[in-house]
């Protein structure tokens, strides 16, 4: 087993996962949002390490275009019709 290497001298060995939730304005997205909020704690956008996007492909692309400058990880959950980009629920 290898030894963990730090890229920056003061960087923590294990990054804490902090989630920020963004959801589309439809009934299916609200239902998924409520299920997620029961299981995880969310934080503000600036404090987060992962952004969870609940919506269709178009909403995911719109959110990526709007928030890519924050340099966060994005995870998409599909609540649309087809879902080529997002995970199906």
Image: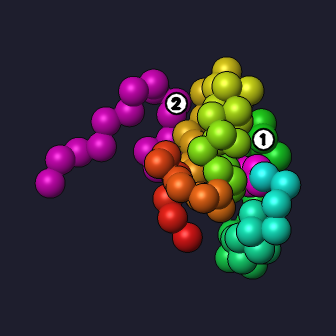
Pick out the residue farthest to the left: 1
| Residue 48 lies in quadrant | top right
Residue 8 position (above or below residue 17): above
Asked if one can make out residue 17 in the rendered structure from this viewpoint, the answer is: no
**Left or right: 2 as drawn, with respect to 46:** left
Q: Secondary structure at mark 2?
A: loop
Residue 36 position (above or below residue 75): below
- Please count the marks in the image: 2
Q: Residue at x 23, y 45 (%)?
A: 3
Q: Quadrant of the C terminus?
A: bottom right
Which circle's residue, 2 or 1, is located before the other in the chain?
2
Pointer 2 residue? 10
Whether residue 17 appears in magenta in the rendering, the answer is yes
Q: Residue at x 77, y 54 (%)?
A: 23
Kindly report which numbered mark, 2 or 1, lies closer to the viewer in this rendering.
1
Which x, y percent locates residue 29? 75, 63
Which x, y percent locates residue 34? 79, 74
Q: Quadrant of the N terminus?
A: bottom left
**Left or right: 12 as drawn, with respect to 31:** left
Q: Secondary structure at mark 1?
A: loop
Q: Residue at x 49, y 46 (%)?
A: 85
Asked if one can make out residue 81 in the rendered structure from this viewpoint, the answer is: yes
The magenta segment: 1-23
Q: Kindly report the distance in space between the C-alpha atoms of the residues bearing marks 2 and 1.
A: 23 Å
Towards the viewer: 87 or 2: 87
Residue 84 position (above or below residue 63): below
Towards the viewer: 53 or 55: 55
Towards the viewer: 26 or 44: 26
Pointer 1 residue? 45
Residue 25 position (above or below residue 11): below
**Residues packed near mark 1 inside 10 Å, few (<14), some (14 to 19) or many (20 plus):** some
């Amino acid at each position: 087993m290898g030894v963990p290497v730090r890229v920056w001298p003061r960087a923590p060995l294990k990054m804490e996962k902090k989630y920020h939730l963004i959801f589309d304005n439809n009934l299916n997205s609200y239902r998924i949002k409520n299920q997620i909020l029961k299981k995880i704690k969310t934080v503000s956008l600036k404090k987060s390490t992962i952004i969870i996007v609940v919506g269709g492909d178009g909403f995911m692309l719109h959110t990526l275009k709007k928030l890519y400058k924050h340099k966060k990880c994005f995870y998409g959950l599909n609540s649309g019709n087809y879902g080529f980009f997002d995970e199906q629920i």
